[in-house]
Image: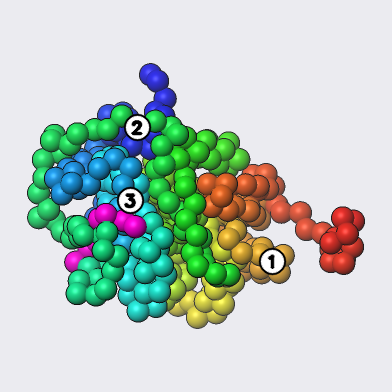
Amino acid sequence: MKAPSTLAALLEAQAERRADAPAYSFLDRAANAGGGYSFGALCRRADAIASALQARGVGAGERVLIACNNPADFVPAFFAALRSGAIAVPTPPPRSRQRRRFESIIDDCRPVAALMAADDARFLIGADSSPDCRRLIVLDPQLAHDEARLSTPALRPSDVAFLQYTSGSTGQPRGVKVTHGAALANLAMIQAAFRQDQDSGFVGWLPLFHDMGLIGNVLQPLYLGSTSVLMPPAAFLENPLRWLETISAARAHTSGGPDFAYRACVRALAHAPAGWAPDLGAWRVAFNGAEPVRAATLEAFVRAFAPFGFQASAFLPCYGMAEATLLAAGAGRDQAPRMFDVDAGQLEGGRA
């Protein structure tokens, strides 16, 4: 069987190969179960939304905003854009804290449509936005279009799959073009570095408009044909221990986040209820990236959670950037991170 050469074809291939296997499970803000998709059901839902895009005149290569706060809305919407041949543009919804970023992205990419849930769309309706963004599709269970009517475009690996916007911490957010081929190559590299397979389950809470959340917790599980359990960022931020509880319940192989997430778990442990005892023994890849990795954080986390089965060898510090799709460098798996004390001044001069 020929390997898929685009992300759109990858979803279709997994839907044919593992139609009834669980692909994504969703938790709500309180970390309670909130439904999910098998690979087959996800492909059908994505194609139905893609059909709605095409019915509204969205053509191949045009930009479509994916502005969904809830992972259960984001995942099918993202794949719908790809299946229609459009370029997906993940962005936070236009709520007050993210309004400026949202408007900056609209001004930069000039989208022709937006896919949003009803509770997110209300922030956009009636507000000033790009004149090019004329078609707003509200995602609700009643969005009924026949996926069989989808006109599947002939995509190439060199075609742009999505625009990944940088954080904008040092200026305006900047869109990086990620092609289907580049995404698939990076997914293969991650699989090799993390030594993952179909049985490597995932748990994620990172925002899906962020490259670590999108590629690490949505595209990588699809590439492997494994299962990903996704919760909204608020579920973690309100109680970091929910993350570890979910890893335990799912027997997850891979999960991670920025350094601050591990520090938050260490602090939260002091307030854990009596008898709190997750089993973290199945967690084999605890990636740490997106901000400086601190040795003190790794050491504190191991001390705090080794009694619950966490192994220091699970830590995998890594470095990534949107310009490299995601992963650029990382430590080896199944070995505790090696730490060195170096003189910062000498290091700047090329000596350590």
Q: Amino acid at mark 2?
A: Leu
Q: Is residue 231 visible?
A: no
User: Which of the marked residues, 3 or 1, is nearer the chain's N terminus?
Assistant: 3
**Residue, x 41% and y 42% (percent of image)?**
160
Classify 5 as above or below 72.
above
Viewed as shown, does residue 212 lie left or right of 117? right
Q: Nearer the viewer, mark 2 or mark 1?
A: 2
User: Residue 324: x, y in percent?
Assistant: 57, 46
Crowd around label 3: few <14 · some 14–19 · many ≥20 (10 Å): many
Report the side of 140 relative to 335 (left or right). left
Place of residue 102 in the rendered image (x, y in percent of width and height, measured from the top left): 37, 68
Residue at 18% x, 46% y is 57
**Element marked by disc 2:** loop
Q: Nearer the viewer, residue 14 or 155?
A: 155
Quadrant for the C terminus, please: bottom right
What colouring style does the render use?
rainbow
Q: Is residue 67 magenta?
A: no
Q: Around disc 2, counting alpha carbons within 10 Å, would you say few (fewer than 14), some (14 to 19), or many (20 or more)?
A: many
Assess whether mark 1 and mark 3 are in contact (beta carbons under 8 angstroms). Answer: no
Q: In whole angstroms, how far apart are the C-alphas of marks 2 and 1?
A: 42 Å
The residue at which mark 1 appears reads as 294
Amino acid beneath label 3? Arg
Residue 13 located left or right of residue 121:
right
Residue at (40% x, 48% y) in the render: 162
Question: Magenta residues, as a range?
Answer: 110-119
Q: Quickly name the residue at label 3.
A: 63
Task: Measure how far apart labels 2 and 3 are at the Cα level.
Answer: 15 Å
The disc placed on residue 155 is 2
